[in-house]
Image (cartoon, rainbow, N blue to C red):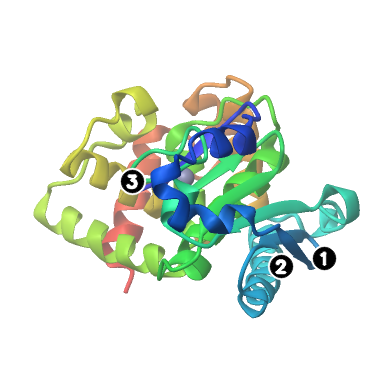
Amino acid sequence: MCHSTHLIAKPLFFIAALLTALPALAAETSLEFTPWKVVKSDHFIVHYRQDEAFARTIAQKADKDYTRIADDLGYRRQSNFWMWDNRVNIYIYPTREEFKKVPGVREWALAITDYEAKEIHSFSGQPNLIDGVLPHEITHLIFRDFIGRSAEIPLWMNEGVAQWSEPVRKDVATRYVRALLKAGDELPLKNVFEMRIKSLGSGKRVEKFYVQSVSLVDFLIQRFGGERFTAFCRLLRDGRTLEAALGQTYPDLKTPERLESEWRAFAGSTV
Ligand SMILES: [Zn+2]
């Protein structure tokens, strides 16, 4: 499940955050008047208000995630970008309440990412922040930079690769998909490929969509490597049909039917 909201346009976060600070909340919102401080790593600037040691941990872990994800996706050669003035800004709010005042944040969101501004906003005090939420959002940003900013990336690919970068979620998805396949309860891949944000709905179907997306990405990268995977993503972004993109990138698979049967064999047997 994606717990974030991804924004295209840069909203006026801070003006609106101040406007919503009602007097009744004054005691809780006093932190809003604590200025942001920053710590920097090679690829990130972490903005924080309270806990410098925690901000440093985040900055170092984000750098490690960046290197790991860029390597996995076959982008080691471009590892110089996202440095200096191009670093990504991560804002860590001290409380969820304060984070929720950022315009566009939905009730259930754990982070919000502004692609154009290269900003991630989230909050401390959530157990999955460092190992789940941040790698997920960092991957969305890396993937978007690598594949192209104006890209219309298929949902399964975008969410699949972001969850794939969260070690715990990947393991959960692997087990979940194996159980689905065993029970014959999985979504046909055709439905996974066609899924859009608007048609997601809720409940079991969404869960299946998310875990099968991770599993597919895992299959393609483990079997054929990250560089071929990103080449495949670019062809789909450019409007190539699935058949054409498969034929060009994965001669061993060629057809969606073959992809489905190979993926089933892989996902049904991984331990
Ligand atoms: Zn996501």
Q: Amino acid at mark 2?
A: Asp
Front-most of residues 109 and 98: 98
Mark seen at residue 108: 3
| Label 2–label 1 contact, CB within 8 A | yes
Vertical order, 112 against 96 (above or below):
above
Q: Residue drawn 62% across and 29% down? A: 11
Vertical order, 209 against 223 (above or below):
above
Q: Nearer the viewer, mark 3 or mark 1?
A: 3
Front-most of residues 216 and 86: 86
Query: Could you tell whether 163 is left or right of 211 in the image?
Result: right
Instruction: Quickly name the residue at label 2.
Output: 63
Residue located farthest toward the bottom when viewing the structure as drawn: 53
Q: Amino acid at mark 3?
A: Trp
Q: Amino acid at mark 1?
A: Asp
Q: Residues under labels 3 and 1: Cα distance?
A: 31 Å
Mark seen at residue 42: 1
Quadrant of image for the C terminus: bottom left
Q: Residue drawn 83% across and 53% down? A: 78
| Label 3–label 1 contact, CB within 8 A | no
